[in-house]
Image (cartoon, rainbow, N blue to C red):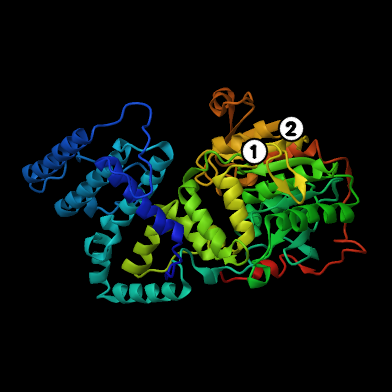
Amino acid sequence: MASPFNVPDEFVQGLFKSGQSLMQAFTGVPAAGQAPPGNMAGPKPSLPDLQARYWQQQMALWMGMLAKAGDQSGEPVVAPERGDRRFHADEWRDNPWYSLLKQAYLLNARLLDDMVDAADLDAKARHKAHFFARQFIDAVSPANFAATNPDAIKLAFETKGESVRAGLTNLLEDLKRGRISITDETAFEVGRNVAVSKGSVVFENALFQLIQYAPLTEQVAQRPLVIVPPCINKFYILDLQPENSFVRFACEQGQTVFLVSWCNPGAELGKTTWDDYLEQGAMKAIEIALAISGADKVNAVGWCVGGTILSSAVAVLRARGDKSVASMTLLTTMLDFREPGDLGVFIDEQGVSQREQAIGQGGIYPGGELGFVFQSLRANDLIWPYVVNNYLKGKSPDAFDLLYWNGDGTNLPGPMYCWYLRNMYLENNLCVPNRLTMCDTSVDLGRIDMPSYVLATQDDHIVPWRAAYRSTQLMGGKSQFVLGASGHIAGVINPASKNKRSYWTDGTLGDDPEQWLTSAQPVPGSWWTHWMNWLKSHAGKPVPARKRLGNARYKSIEPAPGRYVKARGN
């Protein structure tokens, strides 16, 4: 689909299908080619009851406004949810017109949400309808329009229209970029003030560069640490700046760190497969780290889809009798995709088949489209505040390293992406022993018989924590499960030096994640120190730090962070 802001086909189709589902649920007439919806277990609200309550609240709102005649001291009929930052301006509370507008919007939003609950839909269809209803609700907020945003109107008068001119300029610039600016991109440069940990690229192929980082201690653990980050973003989320760098923390704790820097694939890699990411990616990185370090084994870390790639690779290695991985750490990773969270609303047979026909045999899935999907999962945090700030107020976004990284996405090869969608999200094949063959090897996650550390995060909207928990029941070795506070990024990048947030650990592992949570113990601070204490028992004895990066066979190619991570444009 052609769009100035990279809106993917799945988003538009999902919005249309959800509207169809709601129509058929309330009219009882299935859409063409669709079966009648299934009933959800449990009581549902009645549509007439919802309508009656809605009109009662609307009447109370209007009567209250007339009765108070400008006195806004009473309680509102409806209030924004906790954490909703759209209506912080005083006018939304003190001005009768804006107060009425805000409350009418919130009542309409609540009615639409309640109507989805009342619809005769199965669980998956209801989840999808809720998601796309929320997209609509968020989009039509009065805070998003110049004529109904009091801050924007006031600023336009104060600046004599300069904010309007600046907003139009910002809009035109973003249309050229094909994405909404969410940070000051001129404030950061990879290798200058982000991704600055010292090291060298010691190996590269078409798919990735392998970075070895310089030691920061006199002695290091005998076994090196190999990190496999997601291939849908750049690796430097793990090495933003020294004070929040996971890489630097590991080096300071005496680890020899090797890290995969995936390429940003173009047309030349348009036929790359999932097996290539295993054989020529994660497995090759483990092989090179062993050759350079001279160790008997490595400890491996994978994050998000990087964890899925790593787990698949390790399962292949173990099926082949290879015991080169001593332990495995999975950070917010799914191996069982039965509950994929909000990302699941974009996945169905029709959509996957269309992708397979378009790019499944060769082609590129643009990173810009994938970036829009992730932003839409938190539209009120990652889309609409910047529409208001950039276009209605004519301001420039602040400099923020994490958001700079967030906008630095990568493409994916079509065959790899389509295979991943079908076998993970759509059919959930990975968690079934021997259902998948990867690298000509039948894969069973139960063969992953080394110790594992599985981290999930409480508010993760990409990998729901209960889905991540199920990895502990799939792998054959002893698992340590930890639940961190916050979300997919902030819950992982939680520097030990800042001693923020908390985590839960030492629950009783079993089939039910809720039972684990009930028995788990809360611990203040960062999970990083807990993980490092766990890792050290698998890291081997201390040895003198390796002053030379690489070895006679794998020589330094260029300084870290390397060229691959600097390739932009998607």
Residue 40's x, y, as percent?
37, 31
Task: Tell me the residue at 27%/67% (across/down).
Answer: 155
* Residue in front for this viewpoint, 342 or 563: 342
* Residue in front for this viewpoint, 208 or 316: 316
* Mark carried by residue 476: 2
Task: Tell me the residue at 88%/56% (across/down).
Answer: 292
Task: Tell me the residue at 77%/34% (across/down).
Answer: 449
Can you say which quadrant of the picture contains the C terminus? bottom right
Residue 281's x, y, as percent?
74, 57
Residue situated furthest right in the rendering: 552
Disc 1 residue type?
A: Cys
* Mark carried by residue 431: 1
Q: Secondary structure at mark 1?
A: loop
Q: CA distance from mark 1 to mark 2?
A: 12 Å
Is residue 553 placed above or below 483 in the rendered structure? below
Disc 2 residue type?
A: Gly
Q: Secondary structure at mark 2?
A: loop
Badge 1 vs badge 2, beta-carbon distance below 8 Å: no
Is residue 303 placed above or below 260 in the rendered structure? above
